[in-house]
Amino acid sequence: MMCFTRGARIAIMTAVLPLAGCVSVLKSGPPDNLYRFGIVEDPAHEAPIIERDKKPVTLGRVRFAPEIDGDRILTAHGDTVLYIKDARWVAPAPDLFTQAVMRRFEQATSSVRLLPAAARGNGAPLLHLTIDRFEADYRGNAQKSDAPTIRVSGSATLVDSASLQPIASRRFTVDERASASSQSAITSAFDRAVSHYTLQILEWCEVVH
């Protein structure tokens, strides 16, 4: 049975690897289970050859809504949001998501080359990503023990770096059903959802840029 810690009441590619580690030296009891999501870098994968005819895009800061801008795993139960007890992401979710987006572009055969935020100022359009839903949604379940649906939702905006005017914008939503209401099943479903989401961003960038 899943356990949750209560949060504020609001309206609202690869395998997931559990990692053991202490969250705080002041915390008593066993450490939280740590998980990661996203496209894990393959050590055997050769560094891609930079093709000069690819259209460059610079990734801006990936922004998450306040309740998901951290390492806690959010769930939605009716009008109440709860965090999964004794489980966290191995790093803040925005950091893992940024890595997943970068690796999606690096490992794909694409007409677009995604540059890190540090490359800003080279004249390439800017890709701004905002994520407002990143949660395991139990709403609509007949029983509390039913597996949740993982929802990743947000918007992408391509901006001209000189004028800062939007070139194109689109909203994306991915729903991925977990196989069970357990930590491992839920985090695995987050991993699949992020994989589908980053693929949609890649395909959209190829069309609009």
Image: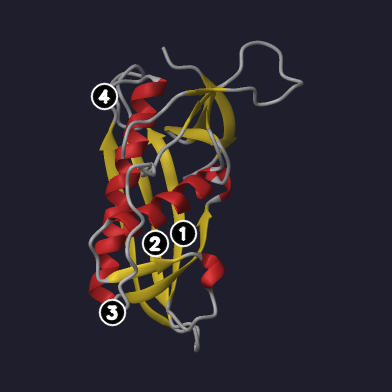
Tell which of 115 and 197 is nearer to you: 115
The residue lying toward the viewer, choosing from 154 and 194, is 194
In terms of secondary structure, where does tag 1 sit?
A: strand
Amino acid identity at mark 3: Asp
Q: Secondary structure at mark 2?
A: strand
Disc ID at residue 155 = 2
Q: Position of residue 15 (x, y in %)?
A: 33, 31
Mark nearest the camera among 2 and 3 is 3
Separation of marks 1 and 3 at Cα, in angstroms: 28 Å
Dot 4 or dot 1: first in sequence order is 1
- Residue under pointer 4: 179
x, y percent for residue 189: 32, 33
112 up-or-down from 32: above or below = below
Q: To which residue does mark 1 refer?
A: 130
Contact (CB < 8 A) between labels 1 and 3? no
Image-based side of 55 in relation to 122, left or right: left
Q: Position of residue 144 (x, y in %)?
A: 36, 19
Residue at point 57%, 27% (across, down) = 6
- The answer for how far apart the CA atoms under marks 2 and 4 are is 27 Å
Location of the N terminus (image quadrant): top left
Which type of secondary structure does the marked residue at label 4 adopt? loop
- Residue drawn where x is 53% and y is 51% of the image: 65
Label 3 crowd (10 A; few <14 / some 14-19 / many >=20): few
